[in-house]
Every structure is written in structure tokens, then in C-alpha cells.
Amino acid sequence: MWTAVLTLVYISSALALPPYRIDKNDGRLDIAPPPVALPDEKKDVYYQHMRLPLSTFVGENKVEYGCSAFPLKADEYIVEYLPLGKRDDTYHITISVCDAPYDDSPVWECINPAHVCKGQKREVMFAWTNGAPGWTLPDYAGVFTGNKSQYIILQVHGRDDISDERAADFAHLRLKIQRTRPQLDAAIGIYSVGGHIPAHVENFTADVACEWNMTTPSPIIAYGLHTHSRGIAQSGYIVRNGEWIEIGRGDPLYPLVLFDVTDRNLWLQPGDIIASRCTYRNTGDTNIPMGFTHLKEMCNLFLHYGVPHESLAETRSLSCSSNAQQSQWEIFDNIPVDASNPSGDTDQARYVKAFHLTHNY
């Protein structure tokens, strides 16, 4: 029934939930002052600028995905991800953390997920698609860089129609890094679907769900929705005692935005089920497999939440996956009727207006 293979990551957003503690007498959440103040930026905050040449994606030796490695110090916290410069030369950028990069070259081809890191350990920290804004974490949370020095891998999916003039430039991403520990560590759960999208379908749905089996409540900081060109709607929910609580809905053809929901005071409680649905249209004559290229499809819900630092070890490897041809759970019989309707007063509608977002496809 539930496939519980979770791959956690760390990330954050911008607002300020009340800090919390667990009352050991009855398990209720009580308001508590933050244990530490934010640091003086002049002393405790710095920026790390990462870039990858756009010439990687043009010419005789061009690649589709290019990777480059940068050192990452231990015991620090990423508190902002900011794309810089012109952004329409790339489809998307992903940041991962590894013990060692897959290749020692300054830039290497990494369309194969196994060719990002050396060995099996890879933690995805942030994903961005063309046109989306960057992401600033809330004051109370940060992405822990780990307890030993590692490498951060900048993975860029570049366009192959870059002009000669633009090919001399770079894909840029800047990190803001804080040395002082915030109250909570930001982590990410990735909910994804494999399998394929059948030919000649108008409203094919692919579902994934897993139980939140952590022992303490966790605030949801932000979420992101992502498919490729055949996705027409995507939605995510908390299912608690039979009640469906909407995390978010949207049209996945817009850029992958991390929607800040800290003002909504959404919490994950022990025993909750996180459920997600992608809806597709495929009018072609062939099945479309799930995969990493834009000729294939994806169904990813990125869920970012805060956890106490002492609980990070148990939550840093959480991911949830299913197969589109096998995910027939009874729980989805009661999914809200607008789960495949991206319209309405949604987080995405507000971001589309604020950032002038347009379809990527």
C-alpha cells in the first residue's frame, strides 16, 4: 500500500512561524522564544557564487545536462538561493550535496542521475526552472550543510539554441550562507511517480502517497510542483483522519516555484498521510515514460518543512515514490473534486501576478 522510501533534503523560505517546543506532559505545541538571535551579517553571513559556462550546451561537444562541483563547508546553513543574470538560457538548475563529485573535470555530462555524485549518496537541496524567482528561507530555518566538508553540485539543464553571444556567458546561482544555527533545520521530502503516461488520454491521473511517520510535528515552510509539457494539473494534500487539507494546487506548465506557505500555519502531525496527484494529457500515439529529459515526463511534489536539529538524522533520508500503472489506493477515492483543476485563488495565481510568470512550455 504505502511506499515509504523517502529522500530528504534541506531548504527554506520567507516569513516567521512562531517557534515551538513540545510540552512533555501532554504533547501540545507551546510557543517558546528562539534559542539564538540571527547573526550580525557582517560577521556570520557570506555569499557563495556558483556558475557554469553556457558554452557547455552548444557546439560539437555540447551536453544536455552539465555539472560542476564547488566546496561546501561543514556546520553552516544555507539561507537563500538566488539565480543571477539572464535566465532564459537554461531549462532548470538543481543543487545537490555529495561526499565527492562524480567527475574531477570542471564541467561534465550528468544527464544520468548516477553521474552527479561519486557513489550512491546524493542529497537534493534546491530545484529551479526558468522564470521562477529565487528562494529566501524564513528567519527560523536553514539548510544544514552537514557535519563534514562536502561538495555542492550545480546541475544545469541548458538549451541548445543559445546564441554565440550568450554562449560566452554563464548560468549563475548564488547562495547566502549563515554560520549561526537557526532554530529549525529545513528539509525536503520528494514525492514522485514513475511508470508512463498512456497514449490517447485526456485526463490521466498519477498518484503517490506516504505516511508522515516522524514522532514530532513539523511546520511546512514551502512546496513546489513539477511535471513536463503534458502535465495539466498537480495537487498536494495532508490527509488527517479522513480530512483532506490542501497544501497546494497549480498548473505545472508554469515555472517550478517554491511557494512560501509559512503564513498558513500548516503542520505535519504524526500519522498524517501526504498525498499528491498529477493529471496529464497525451494526445500522441505512443506512451510517454517518466524520466529526466523533456521528451519524457515527471511528477514531483517538493515539500519543505522544519525539524529540530537533533531530529535531522531521522528525517534526512525521506522520499516517497510510486508507479503510475500500480498506484491504485482506495484513499484517492475521496480526493477533492478540484484536485485536477489548477484554477482558483491559489498560491500559484498570486505568484503568477507578482512575478509575471508565463508558461515554460
Image: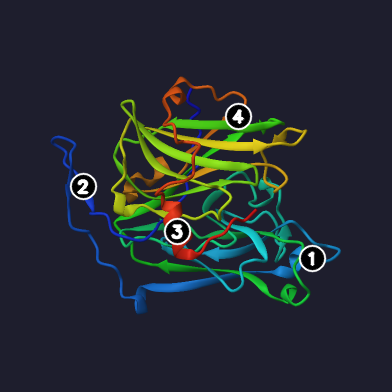
Q: Secondary structure at mark 1?
A: loop
In the rendered image, residue 254, in percent from the top left (x then y), is placed at 56, 53
Closer to viewer: mark 1 or mark 4: 4
Q: Which sits in the foreground, 283 or 190?
A: 283
Image side of residue 292 versus residue 78, left or right: right
Sequence-wise, which precedes: disc 4 or disc 2?
2
**Residue type, mark 2 in image:** Arg
**Residue type, mark 1 in image:** Val
Closer to viewer: mark 2 or mark 3: 3
Closer to viewer: mark 3 or mark 1: 3
Sequence-wise, which precedes: disc 2 or disc 3?
2
Give the residue displayed 29% in from the left and 39% down from the top. 216
Give the spatial CA distance, label 1 vs label 4. Answer: 35 Å
Give the spatial CA distance, label 2 vs label 1. Answer: 53 Å
Sequence-wise, which precedes: disc 2 or disc 1?
2
In which quadrant of the rendered view does residue 198 lie?
top right
Give the spatial CA distance, label 4 vs label 3. Answer: 29 Å
107 over 295 or under it: above or below:
below
Decide: marks 4, 2 in contact (CB < 8 A)?
no
Q: Secondary structure at mark 2?
A: strand
Closer to viewer: mark 4 or mark 3: 3
In the rendered image, residue 295, in percent from the top left (x then y), is placed at 73, 45
On the image, numbered disc 1 is attached to which residue?
58
Sequence-wise, which precedes: disc 4 or disc 3?
4
On the image, numbered disc 3 is attached to which residue?
351
Q: Which sits in the foreground, 52 or 146?
A: 52
Give the spatial CA distance, label 3 vs label 1. Answer: 32 Å
On the image, numbered disc 2 is attached to which residue?
21
Crowding at mark 4 (Cα within 10 Å: few <14, some 14-19, many 20+): many
In the rendered image, residue 71, in percent from the top left (x then y), is placed at 56, 65
